[in-house]
Image: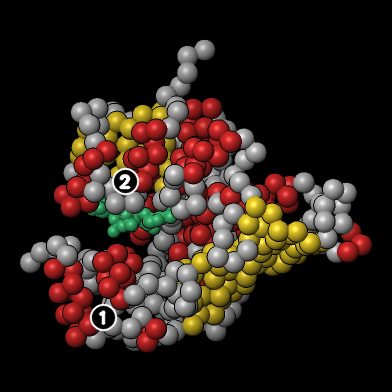
Amino acid sequence: MEKKIMRIGIMGTLRGGCYLDIFKKMDGAVVTCVCDFNLRSLKNVEHLLDDSIKVFDNFDDFITSGLMDAVMLCNYFAEHAPFAIKAMEQGIHVLSECTPAITMAECVQLCRTVEKTGCKYMLAENYPFFACNMDMKRRYDSGKMGRALFCEGEYNHPADAYTINMLGPGRLHWRNWCPSTYYLTHSMAPILYITGNELKAVNCKNVFAPEVKKGTAVTVGDLVAVMLCEMKDGSLARIVGCSGWGGHGNWYRICSENGQMENIRGTLDQVRVQYNGWQVPEGENEIAIHSVKWFDDEKMNSLATNAGHGGGDYWAAYYFTKYVNEDVEPFFNVYRAVSMSAAAILALRSSLNSGVEYKIPDFRNEEERKVWENDNDSPFPDENGNATMPCCSHPDFKPSEEDYAAAERDWREAGLITD
Ligand SMILES: NC(=O)c1ccc[n+]([C@@H]2O[C@H](COP(=O)([O-])OP(=O)(O)OC[C@H]3O[C@@H](n4cnc5c(N)ncnc54)[C@H](O)[C@@H]3O)[C@@H](O)[C@H]2O)c1
């Protein structure tokens, strides 16, 4: 049988540069085109382009070019769903950067579009594919730990004011308005992946601490979001969204009937496993720290070694290629993807509403979807600076005009904005 080769286009060439590099080397994929309307972003990938890759500056021309079977969306965080829907309506499969959707209505529309078009949709959530998380998944699937009762997922990413400004050039750039809960997939997805659990309900409280982002950062938002998620099987998970207390790191912990496991703080390739003394499975120790790899197979491991985000970027691209070419259903299909967006949206509402609990709809169920199909509230400002709901627990907070002026100086000096 002839081997299938997926033709893929990359939309957005900042983050997209990593995936351009990975897909160029991926067995079973060929990059045929890229799209970005910012020349500066395109410069970022200049060294990866050649005559076989067509460059577009307009999404409509790009998506109707006939050059691709699939598109990877690395455009702005708050605009993935409309572009994913447009692509699938052209019969093009979608690999979307996080987050899948920013409103409940978009969550519903994404599911309906996948069902209507028959296109394949996968979320490019990469943190579940750290070596530690893949190892914990294998251990969990072996059944030795028993059922998870309580889990924890942390993604903490503090940054200095200048770095924050360089990542969010422009008063209305999504990074300056992103609620901590909305960037939750890096802390939540590994827990769902390891345990296979599905979300049922969420509540949340935030920590507002603008003084921590010292200097001229012009972000509006809470620094920490603590979400308590109930899973369909009654277990709980504490998830922190994307938070910013001192000390960068990722940490995942699974507490189960017979024991618990977690990555050692500060590492992505060491897992501590502990069983109850009276329930140590044959061949295991009561307490052990394991150095772990993605797979037992060295050839597989070497493929991910040089990829970004602890190798996770490689596996996201790998599983999507397998999905398109071989029909292997990925874990982060549209339903799991939008359930995380719904948790993000409803967690923010919970935090604005004294921590009240919200039920997360079952997005396979049309009756449950109908309830949310017209819910378009979003905390991200439109081009006129207007949002339909607050993005943080202190709705009246605004950076000062002095801070904006200083940030604008930084953006201009770095060539990120022009007058
Ligand atoms: N999974 C991860 O580890 C990870 C890491 C970094 C970024 N991301 C995600 O990647 C996405 C992009 O983030 P980023 O860091 O590249 O910064 P960004 O959002 O500032 O850049 C987006 C790029 O897309 C281009 N773009 C946007 N809309 C366009 C349009 N309509 N037509 C043509 N080009 C368009 C912009 O010019 C820019 O170059 C975000 O969703 C972010 O969350 C994920």
Identify the residue at image location x=80%, y=49%: 143
Query: Which residue is label 1 attached to?
Result: 216
Identify the residue at image location x=22%, y=82%: 403
Q: Amino acid at mark 1?
A: Thr
- The answer for how far apart the CA atoms under marks 1 and 2 are is 28 Å
**Do labels 1 and 2 touch, CB within 8 Å?**
no
Identify the residue at image location x=79%, y=56%: 145
Whole-percent x, y for residue 80 in the image:
37, 52
Residue 322 versus residue 79 in the image, above or below: above
Q: Quadrant of residue 100?
A: bottom left
Query: Which residue is label 2 attached to?
Result: 17
**Would residue 291 appear left or right of 66 to someone viewing this image?**
right
Residue 364 versus residue 34 in the image, above or below: below
Q: Amino acid at mark 2?
A: Gly
Residue 363 versus residue 231 in the image, above or below: above
Q: Quadrant of residue 34?
A: top left
How is the structure coloured here? secondary structure
The residue lying toward the viewer, choosing from 60 and 186, is 186
